[in-house]
Structure formats: structure tokens, C-alpha cells
Amino acid sequence: MGSESRGGSREGGGQLPGPIVEELLGWESKELRLLYKSRFAVCGLLRAIPPACRHLLMRLLYLPNSDSSPIPYDVARASFESDRSYQTASTQLLDLRIMEREAIGSVISFTLNAAFAENLRKSISMDLEAPFQRADGSSESVSEEQLESFGQKKWESVLHFLVGMDPNSTSTTKPPKAIIKALRRINLLNDTGEGLKITSKGFQFLLRDPYSQVWVLLLELVNSVSNGSIKAKREVLQFLFEMNYSEPGVGYNISDLKDGPVEAMEALVALGLVYKSSRQSNTFFPTKVGRRLVANTGSGGRTDEKNVSASLGTCEIIVETNFRLYAYTTSKLQVDLISMFVHMRTRLPNLAVGHITNESVRMALRNGISAEQIIAYLNAHASSRCRSERIPSNVSQMIRLWEAEKDRVKTKSGVLFDKFETEEAFDMVEKYAFEMDAKLWSSRILKTLVVADGAADQVKTFIKSNRIA
Amino acid sequence: MVHFTEGVLVACDVPTKQFILKLDADLKPRSFVLFDLDDNHIFVEGWAVETIRNNLEELYKENHFTFIA
């Protein structure tokens, strides 16, 4: 049993496509084929697809004559134990147009996208050269640490704005207008009339790892910068893939870039993905977040927790069995975040103390955040000095109970039918409602039936047309 | 003759149902329970859902011990 469950969970996690794959699945095949002409995109995508897909792809990559003649179905199928695992792997490769299906009569065969296969083989056997032209002439130099803190600061200002604990934030710390607009467009912020307020979606957004956060916002910004032009989007995405292979602390020329990334440059700077010393500067420096974005969002949104805390400011949480919570952090953002579901009591320079109370958790639940999310957050930040590196089980159970308490009562509007004259008549109508999947409740003894609101009219017509008394 | 009534089906646990029944009796003459179906189900007027939820919220609050003043 042990080995089975282990294999199952790993496979289950691997099948979740990351945000990049999700985005690409919505693209037209023409644009995908153009993207596959880039070696960096191909390499980046290889990391982003689930392990089963990667496995199938590598199997097929070095078959003799795979360029000229199609690969028979049996060969592709041979490396998988079950039909199901083969199906899931091949479907995604087909959807991404990395693999194309050909059917002549009943004979099914596959071909790999030529540019993709070619680029991948090249990358495996040769070094990748630098993606951009170095800006040699410029005298600017920025240290790696500076870049890292720049990226962090930029992103933290966005998150801070979202948490919104500080309504009179100065213009220097406030994120640019374009970002605020984007936050409202994707419904993370809502104008309640008395200023912007975080929505339940925004609340959930805060608990995701920073790389998926950046990714969500970036896609929205790129869409608006290019008026939804898919070409610009492709170029920006390719640029992100390329940035993955850039050198830390090295400046590159903007003038060598395509139009898409140049147009999006302002948004990229605002999100802290690249650094520019001034607006007019012709040199850009990819930051750590920028360089790692593609690699980290690829693997189904699962990033190691070290990265998470590094970009938000470290936070170690100890939760006691008496619901007292100690958060060792210097980041105001983390404290603001925690105070969304914890009753905060004391704030010291490197420590915040609070209580997890029914009231505070209830408030969070009302804001649309789930008990699982709270527990996941606390577990992810649990101090390494805690024995099991998890919060006490009585606390997590209690939080779950509080959530369950919220839906102790389930209501569904519907129509109640009663006073059937015979049991046969009742049975007939009950069966009809059941087959429509509209039956909410019924009792043969009371000869009473409750039908969901949407289907009530149909049931009424059924009763009329069958002259059921 | 078959008769039909529009309303809301409420599914809950046994004590909660009893609480709702008591609430119904307290609110007379504006009672809202249309049919008492079984231990876990009752059929009520649509407008009463908010009232039920608010009163339950109060009840839970009363029943919960908070150690913070």
C-alpha cells in the first residue's frame, strides 16, 4: 500500500499543468509553432511540462528517422504501463502541438514538431549561447544584491498595496497606475465607493507563491499593453524564456529586443522582473525574480518554500496548542497578511504575537479565504524548530471545525409537491424528477417531493401532460 | 390533486433543526416553516433564510468561549 500511495501522489502532482502550460494551451497552433523556433522557449517548456509528458517526449526524440517518417502508435505507447497514463501524457503534448497525430485509415502515427525537436536536440548536445547582446559600452553596473533587493521591493510594494493596510502610502511606495488598474481588472481589488478594497479573490492571491502571483499579473499587463495582440504576447513570453538563461548582474541592450518586450518593458520594471537605472536607459538588468520566473512557474505552481519566503521576507511561525501564535518576522507585509486571520496583540521589532480566535478566523472565512488555505499557510511557514514543522493538530482541526460550522445549514430553493392521490402517481413523478437530477428530497410515506427550482416547471408540465392527480 | 408550494429546502443536523423550529415558534405570527419534513430537513419560506442564518450566527457566538477580552 505504501508504494502505491507514494506513486499515486507523485503522479497526481505532476499532472497539474503549471500556469505557463495553461496559458499556452489557449494559443493557436500557428503561434505555438512560431514560439517553438526559439531554443530558449523549447528548453523552458521542457521544464514546464509534467514529468510524464517529458518522459514521452524524450523517448520519441532520438528515434531513428523520427524526422522523416512518422512514429507508429505502438512505439509511443510502449513506454507506458497503462493506457491512462499514456493518454494523459500524449494529450497534453498533442494540445501543445509539440506532437501531431496522423491517422491513415485505422493506423495512428505521430510526428514531432520539427522545429521543437531540432531545437531540443541541439540544446541537449550543445551549450546555449547567451540570449541577449551584452551592453558593453555602458558604464552602468549593478550588483547582484542590488538587483535582488530591487525586485523584492517592487513586488512587495504591489502586495502591500493589495493588503491595503496603509491607505496613505506615499507615492514613492505606491505601485504605478497601470498595475493598480490591472489589479482591479482581474478582480483582486474592488472599488467599494470608499476606496479600493481587497476582494476574496485577492485574499487567495496573497497566499499563493510569489512566482504565480507575478505570472498572473504579468499576463494581464501584457494583454493590456499590446491590446491583446498575440504576436506581442508571444514575443514577451519568448523574452521571459530567454531571460531564464541570462547572466546575473549583467546588463543587456534594449535596442536588440523585439517590439513586444520593448513595449512591455515598463510593466516588467514595475513588477521588478528587470531593472533599469532610468526610464531612458538603453540597458536592462534581469533581476532574480525575472530570471527564475519561467523555471519556477513551470512545475505546476509548486515552488520550494525557501523561494517563497525569500521574496516576501522570511517569516517563521510557531503556533502553540493554546492558539497563541508567534511570528518571527521583520516584514510588515507578512504581519499584515497574518493579521487577516489572526487577532494580533503585540508587535515587536522581529516578532509579532497574536491569537487565533473564532472571531478572527470567521472574518477570514467571510472574506472568502478557506480553512485549508490558512492551515497551508501556517504549515508552510512553521518554524523549523517546531518538532514536526506543522502547526498543532488541535489548532488545525479547530480551524476546520469553524469552517464546517459555517455551512452547518445548507439551503436550496425549490418547489415542494404534495397531496398526490395515489402512490403510483407519486412514484412516477419522483422517478421523472430523479432522472432529471432535480430531486432534492422525497418521502414515499408522506407522498411529498421537493424539486430544484430550475426544474420545477418541467415537473409541473409533466404532471399536467400525464394527467396525474 | 397535486399541490405545489415554492420555498427553500433547509438541510441541517438535528439540534440545528430544533433551534430553527424554536425560532419559528418565537417569531409567530410571522412563522416561516411550511413543512417539517424529517429529522434533517425542513421546508421554509424563501425570505426566512437570512433570518435563520443570522440567528444561528448569534447562537454560535454565544456558544463560543473567547479567552480574549
Image (spheres, rainbow, N blue to C red):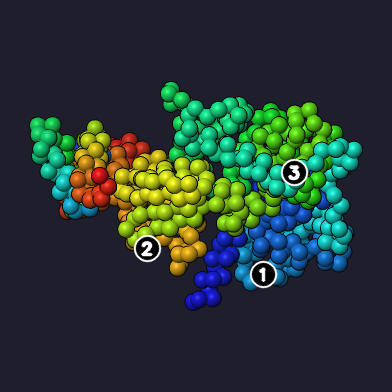
Residue A151's quadrant in the figure?
top right
Labels 2, 1: one chain: yes
Labels 3, 1: one chain: yes
Q: Position of residue A60 (x, y in %)?
A: 78, 64
Task: Look at 53% across and 37% down and name the residue there.
Answer: A160
Which mark is on residue A286? 3
Q: Is residue A108 left or right of residue A179?
A: right
- Chain for mark 3? A
- Give the residue number, with chain letter if any, for mark 1: A80
Q: Name the secondary structure under disc 3.
A: strand
Q: Nearer the viewer, mark 3 or mark 1?
A: 3
**Is A384 placed above or below A216 here?**
below
What amino acid is found at the position of numbered circle 3 in the picture? Pro
Cα distance between the residues tagged 3 and 2: 43 Å
Residue B52's quadrant in the figure?
top left
Please identify the residue farthest to the front as the structure is shown.
Answer: A349
Q: Position of residue A380 (x, y in %)?
A: 50, 57
Which mark is on residue A393? 2
* Disc 1: CA contacts within 10 A as few (<14), some (14-19) or many (>=20): some
Asked if the residue at tag 2 contacts the one at tag 3, i.e. Cβ–Cβ closer than 8 Å, the answer is no
Q: Is residue B9 left or right of residue A320?
A: left
In the depicted view, which residue is nearer to us: A295 or A323?
A: A323
